[in-house]
Image (cartoon, helix red, strand yellow):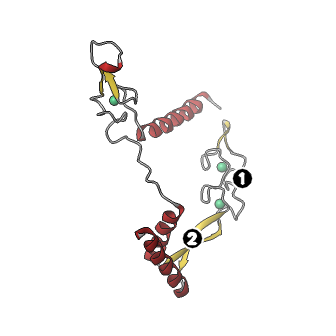
């Protein structure tokens, strides 16, 4: 790899790293502990005070990791069924037309590299993952089709049962 390209590549990697960091940016004042020691005091538990920079969360405002609500498989199903009923459609998997079901990147043909006058460099399409970017290497893509009347009845009945289970 020529030096200029090498630097560009590292720069892209750095951007990706800082981008991921920004989502859950920790508090630089307390280093995520949520507390600091009162200025001018010993590092003693009695001298701990809530970090004023992050108000004790350990994360910068707006950068706290999203709380994960506890969901059961039943709840997950209910979320899906609600969506299907709203759309009046059900998911259907079809063979990926971009890679023709191979799951392999169709630009580099699965080598992970593309070539220019400088020689090989990571494939711009799949970023050297070698996977088809359309199906993510899954060989199939998620599509939708109209829900049949029978399916609608089935899912509505499932939903009623779910709501009953939740109420109890
Ligand atoms: Zn803090
Ligand atoms: Zn590729
Ligand atoms: Zn594909």
Report crowding for label 1: few under 14, some 14 to 19, many 20 or more residues within 10 A (C-alpha): some
Report crowding for label 2: few under 14, some 14 to 19, many 20 or more residues within 10 A (C-alpha): few
Query: Which disc number belongs to residue 143?
Result: 2
Q: Residue at the location (32% across, 33% down)?
A: 56
Q: Locate residue 35, reporting x and y percent.
A: 34, 27
Q: Locate residue 155, reporting x and y percent.
A: 51, 78
Instruction: Please tell me whether residue 136 is drawn above or below residue 122 in the rendered image.
Output: below
- The residue at which mark 1 appears reads as 109
Q: Residue at the location (29% across, 34% down)?
A: 55
Q: Residue at the location (64% across, 63% down)?
A: 98
Q: In the shown orientation, is residue 76 left or right of residue 129?
A: left
Q: Give the quarter of the figure containing the N terminus.
A: top right
Circle 2 — which element?
strand
Is the CB of mark 2 within 8 Å of ligand 3?
Answer: no
| Pointer 1 or 2: first along the chain | 1
Query: Which mark is nearer the camera, 1 or 2?
Result: 2
Is the CB of mark 1 within 8 Å of ligand 2?
Answer: yes
Residue furthest toward the front? 168
């Amino acid at each position: 790899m020529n030096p200029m390209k090498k630097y560009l590549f590292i720069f892209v990697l750095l951007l990706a790293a800082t981008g991921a960091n920004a989502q859950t940016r920790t508090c630089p004042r307390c280093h995520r502990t949520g507390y600091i020691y009162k200025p001018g005091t010993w590092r003693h538990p009695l001298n701990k005070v809530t970090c004023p920079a992050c108000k004790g969360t350990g994360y910068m405002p707006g950068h706290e990791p999203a709380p994960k609500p506890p969901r059961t498989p039943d709840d997950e199903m209910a979320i899906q069924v609600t969506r299907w009923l709203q759309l009046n459609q059900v998911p259907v998997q079809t063979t990926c037309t971009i890679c023709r079901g191979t799951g392999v990147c169709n630009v580099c043909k699965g080598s992970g590299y593309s070539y220019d006058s400088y020689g090989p460099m990571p494939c711009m399409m799949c970023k050297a993952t070698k996977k088809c970017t359309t199906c993510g290497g899954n060989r199939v893509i998620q599509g939708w089709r109209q829900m049949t009347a029978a399916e609608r009845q089935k899912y509505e009945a499932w939903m009623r049962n779910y709501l009953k289970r939740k109420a109890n």
